[in-house]
Amino acid sequence: MANKIDYAGQSDDQLGESLSNLKREQFNLRFQAATSQLEKPSRVREVRKDIARIKTLQAQRSAAAGK
């Protein structure tokens, strides 16, 4: 992954914005895949994993704030 982003260094607002952008990209990639216009199939997996990373960070932060 050449353009790996450090999500741990982002604020909660930045994480939310990144998550929103990634979900929008995931939606667009699904449409491209359905119409056989997907140029980079590996990007689907990267986006999915980035979404999981952000959700994990958000869950960890909310659990730490609850203690």
Image: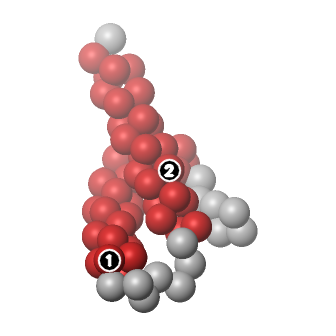
The residue positioned 71% from the left and 68% from the top of the image is 2
Q: Evaluate whether residue 1 shows in this view.
A: yes
The answer to whether any part of residue 17 appears in the image is: no
Q: Residue at x 53, y 85 (%)?
A: 39
From this viewpoint, which residue is outermost toward the bottom? Answer: 37
Please provide percent x and percent y for residue 55. 37, 41
Q: Secondary structure at mark 2?
A: helix
Q: Seen in the image, is 28 located left or right of residue 8?
A: left
Could you say which quadrant of the image residue 67 lies in? top left
Please determine whether, in this image, residue 19 is positioned above or below residue 31: above
Type of residue at label 1? Ala
| Disc 2 and disc 1 in contact, CB within 8 angstroms | no
Q: CA distance from mark 2 to mark 1?
A: 20 Å
Looking at the picture, tell me which residue is in the foreground, 16 or 22.
22
- Say above or below: 48 vs 37: above
Mark closer to the observer (2, 1): 1
Instruction: State which tag comes first along the sequence, 2 or 1.
Output: 1
The quadrant of the picture occupied by the N terminus is bottom right
The outermost residue toward the right is: 2
Image spot of residue 28 (x, y percent): 32, 77
Residue at image x 41%, y 84%?
A: 36
Q: Secondary structure at mark 1?
A: helix
Snapshot quadrant of residue 4? bottom right
Q: What's the amino acid at mark 2? A: Lys
**Camera-nearest residue between 34 and 1:** 34
**Left or right side of 38 for 23:** left
Residue at 35% in and 30% down: 59
Numbered badge on residue 47? none
What residue would you read off at disc 1?
34
Circle on res. 49: 2
